[in-house]
Structure formats: C-alpha cells, structure tokens
Image (cartoon, rainbow, N blue to C red):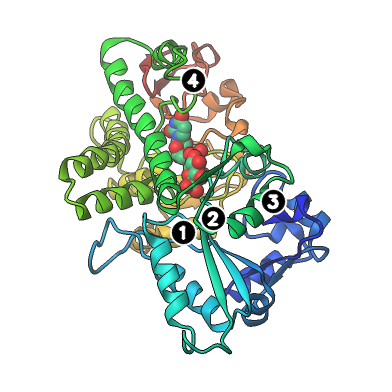
C-alpha cells in the first residue's frame, strides 16, 4: 500500500487493522519501531505517511469512504477441524468481507490480495451479497465487484519487487472494476506486465507460483545430499544446470530448507485442494515437496549431532542467523527454529545471534523448550558478534546475512574449544579462509572439509 500511495499521490490510501498496537507501531514517530523490517520501507513511510498514506483503527469510516478495498489479511494453515494441517483458515478473510458488507456505501470494488485457495472469491461474493439488508430493497443501493490480484513480492526485497514486478495479475469479470485497478498499476508498471485473467486462474496462479518455486528448492536440496555423498559440488551442479536457460539460474541455492510464512502454507493448501477434487496422486506429488523440505532440516540437525559422536549435550553451539532468509526480521517456519529445537532436545547450549530478529520473539517461540531449559540457562542471545564465540564447540550458519560473509575466522578460531565445527548451511564460507586454523567445516552440498 505504501508503494501504491507513492505512485498515486492523488489517491488516499488508508491501512486499517483490528490490532491497535500494530497500527500504533506503524504511526510511531520513531521509525525504528515499524513492525516490519524491509529495506527501503522506512524511508518510504517517512516521506508519505500522513500525506496520502494513513494507518488507522477506524475500520467503519475507512470502509465507508473507500471506493476500493484490498483484503490483505493472513490465511494461516488450519490447526484443527476439517482440513487441519493442510487447508487455509479463511476466518480473517470472511471477517473482513463481513465488515465490508456492514459498513460500505455505494459501489465498492473488493480486491483479494491475501493468498487464498482457488474459489475464495465466491465466498467473498456470497458474504457481500447475503449481508445486504434486503437484496431486493431498492433503497439499498450498495453494489460490489470482486477482483483477485495476488501478491508476488518476497520478504527482504519487497519494495524492489513491488516497484519492478515480473508481472501483476488482475482476475475478474467486471470490466469497470478491472479498468480501475489496472489504472492504478499502470502508474508505474508497464501495461504488458499486467496480466488479465479470470478470477480462478488468478487465485490458482499464486498458489502454483509458490509451489513451483518451493519445488525447485526441494529438488536442489535433494541433490545437495547426493553431492555430499559423491564428491560432486552443489554450486558447480547448480551453475551447470542453471545455465540451461530453460531451467534458469534463480532459486537453485541449496540451503537448510525453505522457511517463511508462504511456501509451506501454500503447498499444504494446494495439497488439500487437490485432495478435495479427488486428485490424490497430484496431492501426493506436492506433499513430497514439503516432506523433502522437512527431511533437509532433519538431515542437517542429525548430522550436527553425529559429528559430535552422537552427543551435543552441554556443548556450546552458536547459531548465526534466525531469520528464514537475509534482509528480513521474519523467522516464521525458519529452518533455524526447527534446528534450534532439535539441538535443545539433544541437550546443547545455544547462543543465538541475528541482526534483525527480535530475541523476545525467538524466546516466545522456543517457549516450550525454554521453560524446560530456562533454569539451566541453555539459550542465550548475543548482541555482540565478536564476543559470541568464546569457548564454542560449533557454529551453525543458518541465514545468509552479509555480516557473516566476512567474519575474521583467524580471530574466531582462537576462541573456540577444539575440536570445533562450522556448519555452513548457506555456502557462504570460503574454504581458504579457514585453512590451517584447525576448524572442521561442513558445507551444504559439499560435505566435510577438515583443515
Ligand atoms: C515467497 C515467494 O518468493 C514470493 O514470490 C511470494 O509472493 C511470497 O512467498 C508470498 O507468498 O507472499 P518469501 O517467502 O518472502 O517469498 O521468500 P523467498 O525469497 O521465496 O524465500 C523462501 C525460502 O526459500 C527462504 O527460506 C530462502 O532461504 C529459501 N531459498 C530461496 C532457498 O533455500 N534457496 C533458493 O535458491 C531460494
């Protein structure tokens, strides 16, 4: 919405939320308190906030005023009930549609921005229409058009992706509504990149795009294990296959397994939809992308324990990076979360460092384990990277933050307790930097290097 506001100064954009604290944080004078860290966002907010971009909890009047409403709420995986563990929970989408139908006036275009299962627009339309006081009442002149325009930005590069997208989708039937939305996008996006589709294609394209991206990561991660077993090097293999233009270079970096709030949730949802339509083999196919992702995380945490001859109990392990990738403070479903839990269960002492993730939030997420281990002080957090390595037995690089790429290994080696290991799950360490330092290195897709 900040990017829309930037390119459309004549449009008043209001972001509303039921979460008062979050809106307060978006309105915070100190821009370091914005709830989301995203390169370039702070500067953008500083420029346009309270000019044509507003953050408010006045949902009623904001809906009343609006000509166009983007539903951008979360759609997490259902935890219980029908479809638990797979289907998306649409309660927030439904709730938003109900609020729109309650407060809107005149004609309102409702745009689905959230990632939703195919056919959700039908649910939104049904709610909008059924909540009209009396559909036949001529005095009730409220009308609606529903469009689908899913979001393809990735965290950490959000502003860049929004300003220069590969494509945007506009799915729908109502020509006037489609025109209104494309007029907005056209302010900064070339027309040929605005793809017009029907509602269902637009909804399904979003889930499918994420599934295809995640599938590439699971494919390359499966090959990373084969490389380690055979002496082939994953970077060389990725480069060789990525040079075939039909395959392409992007999204072929082996790692600890994909994380984040999108891939797992969306593939699970796709699996659920396939099952719903009786396409069990298709469901199994996509389910395996997730299974392989879980396997990669397990494989890495098991391997760490094995390198210490089956016990990490009371070993000091430094975790570098908790975010699911660099340039974000988000660690939902991150491989770090999974690997940290496994290591704690195995009795390790963890020292966690991440330049952006809130340590408070990590603690909350590891709570079950923290409770068990707090008295033993098994998790500590570090603000000072240089002081983190004292007496450490192992260092695990889980996020590819730039600051981890230029560490002074000579200095660090002096602080470690030997025999020591570095586990580089992001392939960011140069072997030559640790040569002759007496540190053992394991790199994803490359295996062991004893210096
Ligand atoms: C993903 C998609 O890339 C976006 O297009 C989509 O809009 C978004 O989900 C969404 O549905 O909202 P995001 O989850 O923010 O974006 O992050 P990605 O850059 O896709 O990374 C996801 C995970 O895959 C990270 O853990 C990353 O480290 C991992 N990854 C990515 C790899 O392990 N190897 C790669 O080569 C690329």
Q: CA distance from mark 1 to mark 3?
A: 45 Å
Q: Nearer the viewer, residue 433 or 5?
A: 5
The residue indicated by pointer 1 is 363
Q: Nearer the viewer, residue 366 or 121?
A: 121
The residue indicated by pointer 2 is 359
Vertical order, 389 against 88 (above or below):
above
Q: Nearer the viewer, mark 2 or mark 4?
A: 4
Identify the mark nearer the N-term, 2 or 3. Answer: 3
Identify the mark nearer the N-term, 1 or 3. Answer: 3
Asked if the beta carbon under badge 2 is closer than 8 A to the nearest atom of ligand 1, the reply is no
The residue indicated by pointer 3 is 183
Vertical order, 399 against 362 (above or below):
above
Q: Nearer the viewer, residue 277 or 313?
A: 277
Give the percent coordinates (x, y) of residue 150: 51, 51
Mark identifier at residue 249:
4
367 vs 278, left or right, is right
Quadrant of the drawing holding the N terminus: bottom right
């Amino acid at each position: 919405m900040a990017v829309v506001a930037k390119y459309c100064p004549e449009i008043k954009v209001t972001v509303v939320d039921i979460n008062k604290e979050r809106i307060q944080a978006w309105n915070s004078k100190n821009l370091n308190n914005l709830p989301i860290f995203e390169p370039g966002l702070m500067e953008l907010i500083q420029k346009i906030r309270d000019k044509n971009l507003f953050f408010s909890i006045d949902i009623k009047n904001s809906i009343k005023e609006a000509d166009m409403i983007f539903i951008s709420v979360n759609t997490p995986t259902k935890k219980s009930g029908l479809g638990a563990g797979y289907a998306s929970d649409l309660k927030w989408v439904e709730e938003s549609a109900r609020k729109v139908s309650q407060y809107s006036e005149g004609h309102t275009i409702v745009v689905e921005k959230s990632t939703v299962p195919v056919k959700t627009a039908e649910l939104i339309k049904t709610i909008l229409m059924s909540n009209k006081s009396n559909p036949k009442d001529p005095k009730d002149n409220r009308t609606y058009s529903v469009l689908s325009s899913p979001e393809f930005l990735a965290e950490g590069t959000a502003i860049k992706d929004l300003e220069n997208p590969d494509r945007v989708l506009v799915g729908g039937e109502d020509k006037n509504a489609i025109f209104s939305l494309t007029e907005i996008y056209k302010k900064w996006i070339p027309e040929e990149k605005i793809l017009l589709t029907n509602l269902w294609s637009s909804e399904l394209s979003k889930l499918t795009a994420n599934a295809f991206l995640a599938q590439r990561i699971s494919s390359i991660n499966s090959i990373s294990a084969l490389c380690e077993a055979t002496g082939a090097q994953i970077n060389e293999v990725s480069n060789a296959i990525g040079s075939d233009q039909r395959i392409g270079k992007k999204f072929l970096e082996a790692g600890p397994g994909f994380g984040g709030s999108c891939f797992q949730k969306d593939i699970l949802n796709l699996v659920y939809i396939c099952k719903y339509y009786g396409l069990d083999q298709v469901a199994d196919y996509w389910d395996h992308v997730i299974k392989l992702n879980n396997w990669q995380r397990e494989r890495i945490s098991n391997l760490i324990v094995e390198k210490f001859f089956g016990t990490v109990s009371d070993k000091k392990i430094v975790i570098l990076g908790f975010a699911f990738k660099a340039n974000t403070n988000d660690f939902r479903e991150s491989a770090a979360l999974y690997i940290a839990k496994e290591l704690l269960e195995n009795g390790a002492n963890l020292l966690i460092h991440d330049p952006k993730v809130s340590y408070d939030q990590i603690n909350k997420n590891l709570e079950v384990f923290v409770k068990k281990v707090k008295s033993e002080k098994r998790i500590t957090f570090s603000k000072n990277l240089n002081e983190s390595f004292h007496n450490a037995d192992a260092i695990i690089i889980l996020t590819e933050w730039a600051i981890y790429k230029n560490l002074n290994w000579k200095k660090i080696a002096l602080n470690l307790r030997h025999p020591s290991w570095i586990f580089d799950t992001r392939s960011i360490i140069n072997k030559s930097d640790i040569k002759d330092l007496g540190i053992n290195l394991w790199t994803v897709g490359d295996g062991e290097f004893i210096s």
